[in-house]
Amino acid sequence: MIQLERARLERAKRVGRKFQNPVPTAVGGLKIIFRILPLYLSKPNDAVPRVPPGPFRTDPCVYATAPASGLRVTWFGHSSLLLEIDGARVLIDPVWDERASPWQRFGPRRFFAPTMPLEEMPALDAILISHDHYDHLGAESVRTLTRVQPDVRWITSLAVGAELQRFGVAPESITELDWTDSTAVGALTITAVPSRHFSGRKLSNRFETLWGSFILKGIDHNVFYGADTGMWPGFQTIAADYGPFDLALIEIGAFNELWKDIHLGPDGAVAAFAALGGGVLMPIHWGLFDLALHGWKEPIERLLALAQQRGIRLFSPEPGLPTEFRARTQVLSDWWRR
């Protein structure tokens, strides 16, 4: 068991062509696969909504007016969101594709349609891609964005740029970050920090591109975007070096005891949030794709129970609804109950 003491934040290390996690981490080999297969055959009936949620619709006219609070979030489902922070607009991990899969006829299919066409997205200052997994990097989404916003800047983890170029992004538009690297987007600073996960768009290239979490620090607001990660001692150091955070976006879905090293789940999200020093917790990585063995509502139901027990303030808006962040105001939509 990893001792949850403060860990140093260091640049990523490689062994051969493969990036290494900040702490030793096992990622599903054949032994795990053979344990998982029988579980998938007995998945719960509510892993996918019986009736598609929504429809949800984003009104693009909202973006003509800057957020009065300086911070507004539009969550499009899973980990895709538009962050308007202190005058900058950053689109994070956009997946408008029908499936989080190498094939658009097979694989996890989205529960509801995109809340707005990418063609209606307001002018962006940057697009942030945390890592190359299909539920965070949608090939068709990238192709569309390169067409409709050809001058936008792309910020991503080491070696992911080659994938973006393959989908049409110009090399000069791409900034790759190693862990602890920072880059400026106007007055906004984006910093990559380690996370405990893995990468690869096929079994043969696992770990050959980097993954990470990110700090987005503006003039008045500071946001932690966790992307995909398991629990590790670095959360305390991230808080000490880059906090405090107004809003922490932390994954709660696609969890299971068999892969708890690389996905937090609701209980891990609460533990990570405590290690990050609090603020307001926004649950991400849920509500759009069937990527695990649990019911589709289970992540948010469990998180709500934990938050109530521990007095955690949540920011969980309806999909596609541009929502202003205010530090003392909790946002809780029950869209998933309808």
Image (cartoon, rainbow, N blue to C red):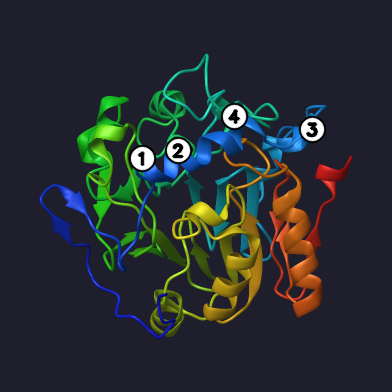
Q: Is residue 206 visible?
A: yes
Kind of element beneath mark 4: helix
Kind of element beneath mark 1: helix
Q: Is residue 78 left or right of residue 214?
A: right
Q: Which residue is mark 4?
A: 120
Q: CA distance from mark 3 to mark 4?
A: 22 Å
**Residue for point 69% across, 30% down:** 111
Q: Which mark is residue 53?
A: 3
Kind of element beneath mark 3: loop
Identify which residue, 132 or 260, lies in the foreground.
260
Q: Is residue 311 visible?
A: no
Question: Which three-letter amino acid code belongs to the residue tagged 3?
Answer: Pro
Identify which residue, 289 or 81, lies in the foreground.
289
Question: Which three-letter amino acid code belongs to the residue tagged 1?
Answer: Leu
The reply to whether the C-beta atoms of the residues labelled 1 and 2 are less than 8 Å apart is yes
Q: Is residue 321 above or below residue 25?
A: above
Question: Which three-letter amino acid code belongs to the residue tagged 4?
Answer: Glu
Q: Which residue is mark 1?
A: 30
Question: Which three-letter amino acid code belongs to the residue tagged 2?
Answer: Phe
